[in-house]
Image (spheres, rainbow, N blue to C red):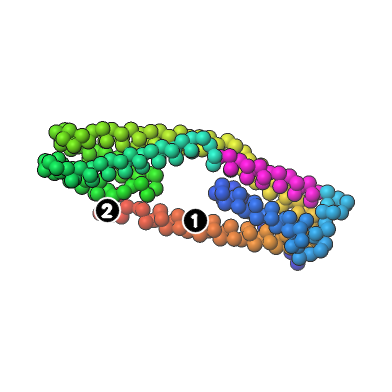
């Protein structure tokens, strides 16, 4: 009969947030099985309270694991609260306001007393209507809309833009969009350095602590039998099987997606 043990599984295959979620679930199972009231085995609850070698080894592995996972958690929270993220959000709000202001102005000018001005205003308003309201779209999609709208507005003959006093609105919208793009570039750079730096390091420590915990539990099973560890091992193996299913499904979808994007004879990308 094969010895019960935690299955081999590399957490490096997971996305950053997936890895953290998996490690937190393992942490919760460890607390429930070895030091909490939810354990299915009274022996497992008392295991850490003992003074033997097994308790010492398991306690050390769990202590290192908790510290590493908590450090991973802190790093993720810090990476999401960088100052440039707030700056980009403010810049996004500013460009939204610029679009709304320009759109409202042009719409109002369609009721101008002078027919010539009304005609130009209707032409400009048709450009706004062509793309719709971009302020409720994803940030990258909004940038695409604003880029096209600004180009179309700037392509209007100079005399029409002058008659409508439109240049100041176009300039404001373009300036706000450029400010946003610069802020996003800085945000991306800062977040990238955080992921490469703090988050990457903390994740590596957490992954290594997980591997160490697995090795410790499997070794203790060989030395002392599986009774004290069976519940924890069964639960962790369920978590591992679940993650393997997610990875397999993702791999299948990626293969299908890659196949769909291939150019077939007679088609162009």
For label 2, the residue is 267
- Give the residue drawn at x 53%, y 37%: 82
Give residue 55's position: percent from left, percent from top: 83, 52
**Front position in the image: 179 or 49:** 179
Q: Tell me the tag on residue 75.
A: none
Relative side of 63 to 175, left or right: right
Q: How far apart are marks 2 and 1 (CA)?
A: 26 Å
Q: Quadrant of the N terminus?
A: bottom right
Does any portion of residue 141 appear in the rendered image?
no
Location of residue 34 by image quarter: bottom right
Q: Residue at x 41, y 55 (%)?
A: 257
Q: Which residue lies at the image location 76% right of the left edge and 54% below the top edge? A: 217
Q: Is residue 16 left or right of residue 28?
A: left
Q: Does the magenta stretch include residue 59?
A: yes
Name the residue nearer the viewer: 16 or 120.
Answer: 120
Disc number for residue 251: 1
Can you give x and y, in whole percent of width and height, for residue 72 in the image?
Answer: 63, 43
Whether residue 41 appears in magenta in the rendering, the answer is no
- Local secondary structure at mark 1: helix
Residue stretch rendered in magenta on the structure: 57-79
**Viewer-side residue, 267 vs 216:** 216
């Amino acid at each position: 009969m094969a010895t019960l043990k935690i299955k081999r599984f590399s957490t490096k295959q997971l996305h950053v947030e997936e890895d953290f979620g998996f490690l937190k679930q393992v942490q919760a199972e460890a607390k429930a099985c070895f030091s909490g009231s939810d354990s299915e085995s009274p022996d497992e609850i008392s295991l850490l309270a003992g003074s033997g070698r097994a308790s010492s080894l398991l306690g050390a592995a769990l202590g290192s694991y908790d510290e590493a996972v908590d450090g991973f958690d802190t790093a993720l929270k810090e990476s999401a609260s960088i100052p440039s993220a707030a700056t980009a959000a403010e810049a996004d709000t500013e460009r939204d306001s610029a679009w709304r202001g320009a759109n409202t102005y042009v719409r109002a000018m369609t009721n101008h007393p002078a027919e010539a001005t009304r005609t130009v205003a209707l032409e400009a308003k048709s450009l706004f209507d062509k793309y719709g309201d971009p302020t409720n779209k994803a940030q990258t999609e909004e940038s695409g809309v604003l880029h096209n709208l600004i180009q179309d507005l700037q392509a209007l003959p100079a005399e029409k833009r002058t008659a409508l006093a439109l240049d100041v609105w176009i300039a404001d919208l373009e300036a706000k969009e450029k400010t946003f793009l610069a802020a996003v570039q800085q945000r991306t750079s800062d977040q990238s350095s955080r992921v490469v730096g703090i988050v990457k390091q903390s994740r590596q420590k957490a992954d290594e602590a997980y591997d160490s915990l697995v090795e410790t539990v499997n070794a203790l099973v060989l030395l002392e039998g599986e009774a004290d560890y069976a519940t924890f091992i069964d639960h962790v193996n369920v978590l591992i099987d679940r993650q393997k299913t997610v990875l397999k499904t993702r791999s299948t979808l990626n293969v299908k997606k890659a196949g769909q994007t291939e150019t077939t004879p007679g088609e162009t990308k």
